[in-house]
Image (cartoon, rainbow, N blue to C red):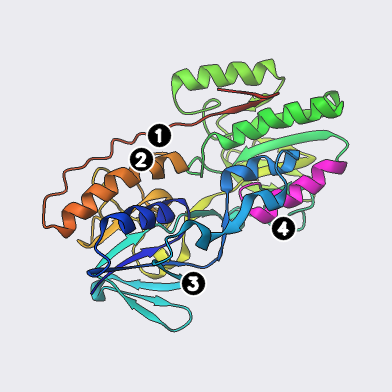
Amino acid sequence: MKNLLILGAGTAGTMMANKLYKELDPLTWKITIVDRDEKHYYQPGFLFVPFGVYQPEDVVKPKAKFLPRDVDFQIAEIDKIKAEKNEVLLDNGRTLPYDLLIIATGTVPVPEETPGLKGKLWYKDIFDFYTYEGTTRLAKKLETWKGGKLVINLAETIIKCPVAPLEFAFLADAYFTEKGIREKVDISYVTPLPGAFTKPKATAMLNRLLKEKGITVVPDFYLERVDEDRKMLISYDEVEVPFDLLVSVPVNKGDEAIERSNMGDEDGLNFIPTDKETLKSKKYDNVFVIGDATNVPASKAGSVAHFEGEILLENILSYINGQPLEARFDGHSNCFIETGFGKAA
């Protein structure tokens, strides 16, 4: 019996468990998937919780519900990947051997990377919406907030779902309009990008929408620290942006287990050097990587993981059969952009 081990039961890992379960002979391959949490959080839904479109319970379900019954689902923290020995150590003391490894450990916001961000104002006047705790606490804050300077800030550009911060700005405009207090809310979108987004056509359209909605864009702003006492964002070149309520999109990093395993790339963000077309690890022959865990130059978004999954399935089957990896990922992604008032782009 051979062992196929998947690390991470988020969107990417769950998709691969289902795809491979349908293709591999259960008498030959045992599929095991490991995750620290038994709960599946529908992360796209986090965007809507602060505005009351979804309730917190709408975005949580058991992970086991989405996995084939015969896949071995283990709930544990990953301590370390010992790729040279083809095994993974778990924090409960268990060692899982593998013949083939898929790493789908994702990425997480790390607000403590920015001085002053996760301090005395955290979850009081500074919130994120990329975590379950953050989005649910922000929902409670918005219920009673009377207005002021609302700042949406991207600390970095390598983040999950790159358009979600823009969507938050659009939905905030609609939310406060419908509450009848829009004139009391000054919304600013503060970004290290030169405009609203990365690609010229999308940026032009999104900049126009922001202007129409009375949302101020502060471009080329690289956040260095947050002055909590003055409630001020401060950039590396000492530009200051004041806030009453800060919705932060913090620095994103890969799982800490990747750092402990010395498998991350050189920039220290714990993303794994991955062949951008075949999705195989650049260092280990029997290790493949998918989704946000990769350093592939594509968006860290669920749609990317979906398109990668189709390519990865082909290449894993080719690898198992001793054939060349001919499937190629082309960086494809897509995204619907919520623009408020029941409209989208």
From this viewpoint, which residue is outermost toward the bottom? 93
Proximity of marks 4 and 2: CB atoms separated by less than 8 Å = no
Q: Residue at x 64, y 45 (%)?
A: 46
Proximity of marks 1 and 3: CB atoms separated by less than 8 Å = no
Q: Residue at x 39, y 66 (%)?
A: 71
Task: Classify residue 210 as left or right of residue 280.
Answer: right
Callout 3: 10 Å neighbours few (<14), some, many (20+)?
some
Judging depth in this view, the residue of 153 and 63 nearest the camera is 63
Badge number at residue 333: 1
Callout 4: 10 Å neighbours few (<14), some, many (20+)?
some
Magenta: predominant secondary structure element?
A: helix
Q: Residue at x 47, y 65 (%)?
A: 256
Badge number at residue 307: 2
Asked whether residue 301 is in view, the answer is no
Q: Quadrant of residue 90?
A: bottom left
Q: Which residue, given by chain and number where applicable, does mark 3 sit on? A: 77
Can you tell which of label 3 and label 2 is closer to the viewer?
A: 2
Judging depth in this view, the residue of 83 and 307 nearest the camera is 307
Q: CA distance from mark 1 to mark 3?
A: 30 Å
Residue type for callout 4: Gly
Can you tell which of label 1 and label 2 is closer to the viewer?
A: 2
Q: Secondary structure at mark 4?
A: loop
Q: CA distance from mark 4 to mark 1?
A: 36 Å
Q: CA distance from mark 4 to mark 2?
A: 38 Å
Write the start and end of the magenta stretch as one range. 129-144
Find residue 215 and report its horizontal and vertical position in percent.
69, 24
Can you tell which of label 3 and label 4 is closer to the viewer?
A: 3
Residue type for callout 3: Glu
Q: CA distance from mark 3 to mark 2?
A: 27 Å
